[in-house]
Image (spheres, rainbow, N blue to C red):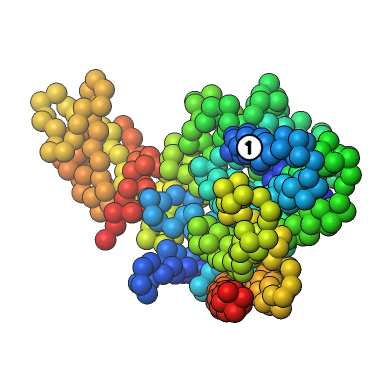
Amino acid sequence: MIALLAIAATHLRRTTRSRVFSACLLLAAVLAAVVLEPVIAIRTRGSTAVAAAVAWQIISIFSGGGFVLAVVLGVWSIQSETRDKTWQALLCKPVRPWQIVCGKFLGVMAVMGGLTFIVWACVHVLMAVSLGRYFPRLDLALASGLLGFTIPAALAICLSLRVHPIASALIALLLRFDALDSLFDAITSSQLPPSVLFVPAALAGAIRAIAPPYEIFNLSATLGSAAAILWGRHLWIGSYASAVVALLLASATFVLKHRELAKAN
Amino acid sequence: MSGDVELVAELANVSKVFLDGWRREVRAVAGLTLCLRRGEIYGLLGPNGAGKSTALHCLLGLLRPSQGTAKLFGQSVEVGAPLFQRVGYMPEDWTAYDFLTVAEMLEVFADLHGVDRTRRRAQVRQALDRSGLTEHANRRLRRLSKGMRQRASLAQAILGEPDLLILDEPTKELDPLGRRDVRVLLGQLAQNGVTVLLSSHLLSEIETVCHRIGVMHRGSLVAEGELDSILAGSASRILRFALPPECSPPVGATVESGDVWRWRAATKDEVHRHLSHLALLGAEIVSVQPESVRLEDYFIEVITRP
């Protein structure tokens, strides 16, 4: 357990002490400022619907961006070890491979948990300042968003053990590609003007992936990913097979979505 | 190998084949057999691409041999096994966790090594002392020179008082002072019963610290033996003699100092022929001694053999 925590803590330090992470935080602050700009409009108009939409957009941006970040951090956690040759030193210690994988996973999720906490605090402040009340569904959405990061992060870590880092990131992203169908929902259901919505909507997604009526496809893809992770020695076969299955499911989701839209029109 | 000698590490008929490109096989190690005895410093030599690092990786379980077996302390090697508590490894060109300070990095590796929390601080301090890094304990590794980073790498290898130390090019980036420190440290460790496997290109280092050496070439061990006997065990002899004033020296003899001449004989027969010739000349034989060999000459001779 000590070894596992040491690996997790090392990854957490690696991430938080990296220049890339500092740059990402700065970028997030700029992005938050851009997104929070409509707060002025909310205060003048006092519209509950608009305030809620802004809160949802913040969560959507975080969910979409966080989903990609979880994959990148997962791949990076292994790739940085192999690049620096610390991987060899790590494997020559009395630490089982599963402990290394779990330690890395804990490290990635600690980073994502910290970011989720920051977003949660921001949303709370936003809602308290603009409306003086809070919607519990936002907490639920953030919690499920954090849960949603676990699969891509774990998948990215496991794939990186066998596959090239870029290929690992692509496969991990593709396995959750089905989440992007919520992009349609984000654009069509919002009350804000499309120009304000377009960029956040493009980043949105993972959080809405569990929304009906497509949960069966998402569930299948998630199970496929989990099976790939648990497949042990033949991980790469499982990963590719899961990627193919997830791609087919994502395609089916898109076809169904298009048919539904065509019917509605 | 006699039964009363404790074998610490063993590679038995190990081969490792890699696939290079589309089904083209590259044999990095071919039928390598290697045994390390307790308390010895073994130098593994070989030109670039000889398969030294692959052999070390097979021994440590980082690579699975295509054929043969690798054992540490009599047990088959498996990644993450408890026996690695007795092993320290220093990889080549290691950049460590450069975002950590030296002390933080050593604490992480102490945790990974399974060092008891109560002993951790003392162990880290000891490793810092032994590797000469006490003054730099609170500096980030990325701010240290290459030589200092190499010392840090050595410090993580000796953490937890391992019984077997495997070092891949440990003195590559070190200055002469650092090399001397490493030599002293390895000598002390060997005296305490620690077995050291040293892979290096620096023959002078090997010559100074190792008890036994093995030379790898094209994946195989082409020569192995006690360093002292290798350096003294050449068949060639040097004949030193003084000539009467009127005599001209034989062809091939060179002046060594003053009146003393030096004549090399490559074989026993040649020694006899030279001695007969010198007797005919009336020369006074000063000495007949085995020619001492430099490790570099031996190494080059071994790997250029047809």
x and y percent of residue A203 in the render?
60, 53
Which of the pair B271/B145 is nearer the observer? B145
Is B228 left, or right, of A46 in this rendering? left
Camera-nearest residue between B61 and A12: A12
Subunit of label 1: A
Residue at 82% x, 50% y: name it: A2
- Residue A180, horizontal then vertical, whole percent: 60, 64
Tell me where residue A18 sits by quadrant.
top right
Q: Which residue occupies 51% across, 74% down?
A: B67
Q: Quadrant of the N terminus of chain B?
A: bottom right
Q: Is residue B271 left or right of residue B30?
A: left
- Residue A35's place in the image compared with B221, above or below, is above
- The residue at which mark 1 appears reads as A34
Q: Nearer the viewer, residue B294 or B249?
A: B294
- Tell me the element at label 1: helix
Residue at x-position 28% and y-position 33%? B240
In the rendered view, does B243 fall on the left or right side of A64? left
Place of residue B302 in the rendered image (x, y in percent of width and height, measured from the top left): 34, 53
Q: Residue furthest front?
A: A45
**What is the three-letter code of the residue carrying label 1?**
Val
Residue B157 placement (x, y as % from top left): 65, 43
